Image (cartoon, rainbow, N blue to C red):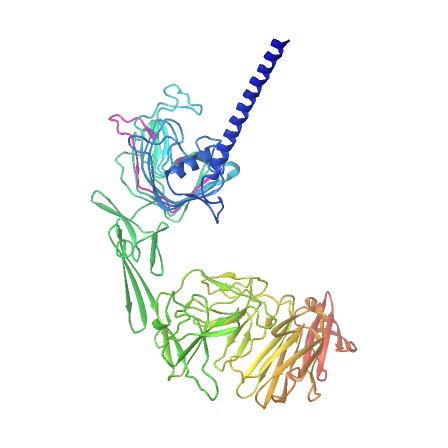
Amino acid sequence: MKNAFSNGTKMNLTTNLVARKFMFTLLAILMTTLSWAQQLSGEGTEDNPYLINNADDWKTFTNNVNKSVNNTAYYLLKADLYLGTEVEPITTVVGHQRNRQFKGTFDGGFHTIHLIMNRTNDFAGLFGTTDNATIKNITVDGTITTDHKFAGGIVGYSNNTSNNTTRLINCISRVHIICDSIREYIDYNGNVQPTGTKPYDCTHGGLVGQNESGIISFENCIFEGSITDSKEEKTANKCTGFIGWVNNTVYYTNCTMAGTIDVKANDNSLKDSMANFHRKAASAKVYFNGPSYYISDYTYPGLATQGTQAPTTEPDNAISKKYIVGKTTYYVPSAEIYGDEVSYYGRDLVESKDFRLTKQHTEDQYIITFQGLDRYAGTYQEVYNKIDVNITPWDAEKQTGWYALSSPNQDIAFSEVENLTSATHNIYRYDEKNRIWQEYRNTANIYSAFENGRGYIYRTLDNGGTITFNGTPNRGDVSYTLSSTYKTDNCTGFNLIGNPYTHSIYKGVAIPDDYLSDGYCLLNTDGTWLYKSDADAIPATTAILVQAQNIRSAQTITMKDTKAAPTAKRANNDNIWFTVKNGQYNDVACIEFKEGDGFNKMAHYNEDAPMLYVSYNGQEYAAANVSDDTKVIDLCFKTKETSRYTLSFKANGMFDYLHLIDRITGEDVDMLIDDEYSFIGTSTDNADRFILKFSYNTGHDDVDEVFAYQNGSDLIVNGEGELQVFDVTGRMMMNASVNGDQRINLKQGVYILRLLGNDVKTQKIVVR
C-alpha cells in the first residue's frame, strides 16, 4: 500500500507540472500576442495613429499585420528608415499572405524608406498584400530581388474584397526590381509548373504587382526606378511601369511613369507583355482623370503605351519637373502653386533650391513670378490688381467715418497695407467672449496683422484718401473659428468675420450657414449696424457681423472661394420689414414667420443713432423668427435725439389684418393701406413704443398666380369663371361671371379675390 500510495502521488505531481508548464506556455503566447499590439505608441486612430519611429517599430508593425493584429488601424511614419542591407537584406513584407492583408492607412509623412529586399516568395514589396488600404506620402528606393511573381515598389498584390479600393496617394517608387532569377512558373501553392504554361511570368510593376479584384487608385504617384533582367538572353517578361496586371478597375490621377522596363522584348507570343502603365484583362476598366505622363526611354519594340507623352518643350506659365534622356529633355508640368508655396506631387518644394520667387509692385498691380531651378524648369507668373478702399476721414461732430474691413490677402500685416496705420488711425476687433472691442496700438500690440476671415473696424483722423491692399490673394478654402459664449444678454455668439477674397461673396454659399443665424449686419459709415438678408452680396474688403447659434464651444467654419449667389426660391417664410429714418440715420428690423433662432440686435457703434428692434420671448432682435399663430408683436424704438422720424413697412405674405399702434399717441395705422407712419421721438420715450397686431393667413401656399391687377382707378381681372370678392372681415362684396379681361370697380381697401373655374385661384389685392 505504501508503494502504491507513493507511486500515485508521484503521478499526480507529474501531471500538475505538465499542466502548469502548458498554462505558462499559453500565457507566454498570449502576452506575446498582446505585446505586438501595444509596442507602438499611439492609439491607431486617424487623430492619434500608431507611430513608427525606427526599424524596430517597422518590424513590430510587420509582425502585427501578419498576425492580423491592428491591420485596419492608422499608422504614421516619423522618420526615414533603412530596411535591410546588402549583406543582410530583409525577406518579410507587411501582409505576407492572401489572408494576412494590410487593410488600414499608412501615412509616410513624406519620408523615404530605403529598402533592400531579397524574397523567395510571392508578393515582394514594401507591402505584400492589401485590401481596402490607403498608402500615402511615401518615397521608396533601393532594390527588390525576387524569383517569384507579383513584385511592386509599394505593393506586391492588391486583392480588394467587396469592390473595395486600395489607394496610393503621393507615392514615389525609385525601387530597382531585379528579376534575373525569375523561375519558369510558380503557381499559387508555390509549385513549379511545366515549361510552356506561363514561362518566366513576373507580373511586376513599378508600384504594384497585381490588382486581383476591386479597385486600385493612383493619385500623384511617380515611378522613377527600373525593372530589369540583366542576363544576356533575357527571360523575364510581363512587367510594367505602374501595375503588372489589372483584373478589374484602375484609376490614374496626375501620375508620371519615368522609369525603365528592361526585360524580354515583346514578340508575337508576348504581345503587350511590357507596358508603360499597366497590363489588363480584356474586361478591366481604366480611367485617366486628366493627363498622366510617360517618358520614352525604351529600346525594345512593341511597348504598349498608355497615358500622355511628356512634352519636350517647356509648357507656358507652368513649373515642370525635368527628365533628361540622352539628348532629350522632357517636362512634366504638374506643380501646384498656392500663394508663395509650390508643391509637386504633394511635396513642398524649397525656395532658392527648387524655385526662385520674385515680387514686383507697379502702380496698379502686384506681380509674383516663380522660376524653376535645378530639377525644375519653367516660369509661372500671377498678376494681381491692387484693391483700393476709399476712406472718408472721421467727422467727430457727425460721428461718421467708420469702416468694417477685412483683408483679401494672405497673412498681411497692418503695416503692409498702404496708408492704413499711423498714430491717428484706430483699428478694433471684437472679443465675443468678453463682449469688448480690442484696439490695436503700435506701442502695445495685441495683434498686428489681418487674420484670415476675421473682420476689423477702422477709422482715421487723417485726411482720408485711399488704403490699398496688395499681396498674394487668398485662394481656395479659408477656415475661421466662431465663438459663442453664453451670458444673460443679447450679444451671445456675435462674431465680426470678413470676406477673405478679392470678389464679392454670399453668406449661405461662400460662408456656410450651418452654425449661423440667417442674415447679417453691415456697418454703415455712421456706425449703425444695418441688418441684411443672405441674398445681399458682401463686397471684397468688407466685414460683416454674424451670430453663431447652437454651438457650445468654438466651431470652425470653412469659407469657399466662390462668387455663386444663393439659389432663388419661393419663400415659404413670409415677413414684415420695418425701416425708421430721419435726416441723418436709418435703421431696420424685421419679422419672419419661420422656425429657428432669430438675429439679435447689436448696439450701434454710434450710440447717438436710433435703434429699431423687435422684442420677442424676452429677447431683442434685429430679425425675429415668429410662429404662424403669433398675433401681437412689440416693436421697440430708442433714440437720443429728439427728431421727426418716418417708420415705413413692407409686408410680404397673406395678411387679413395688419395694424401698427403707437402707444404714445394712440395712433392706429392700417399697414395694408398705408406704408409709412411719421412720429416725433425723444430720448425720454418708452422703448416699447409700438404694438403690431395682425391676422396671418397660413394657407398662402394655395395662392395661385396673379390674375388681377390695378390699372389706374380700375381693377383688371383676367380669367374665366365665377369671381367672388371678399373684404378683410370675410364679407362677400361681389359675385360675378368673368370671361377674359374684365374691369371691376372697388373702393380703396384690402380684398381677397377668388376665381372659380376649372380650378380655384385665390389672390389678395390692395386697392389704393
Residue 725 image position (x, y, % from top left): 75, 76
Q: In the rendered image, is residue 303 in sight?
A: yes
Q: Is residue 80 above or below residue 395?
A: above
Numbered disc total: 0
Q: Residue at x 47, y 84 (%)?
A: 400
Q: Is residue 1 above or below residue 341?
A: above
| Quadrant in which residue 552 is drawn | bottom right
The extreme left residue here reads 327
Q: Is residue 406 left or right of residue 615?
A: left
Q: Is residue 194 left or right of residue 517?
A: left
Residue 168 image position (x, y, % from top left): 41, 43
Quadrant in which the C terminus is drawn: bottom right
Q: Residue at x 32, y 68 (%)?
A: 366
The extreme right residue here reads 731
Residue 194 image position (x, y, % from top left): 38, 18
Using the image as rendered, state which of residue 333 and residue 628 is in the foreground: 628
Using the image as rendered, state which of residue 750 and residue 247 is in the foreground: 247
Give yes or no for residue 404 being in the magenta stretch.
Answer: no
Residue 609 image position (x, y, % from top left): 54, 84
- Image: magenta residue range: 208-237
Q: In the rendered image, is residue 246 in sight?
A: no
| Quadrant in which residue 373 is drawn | bottom left
Give yes or no for residue 229 being in the magenta stretch.
Answer: yes
Using the image as rendered, state which of residue 220 and residue 353 is in the foreground: 353
Quadrant in which the N terminus is drawn: top right
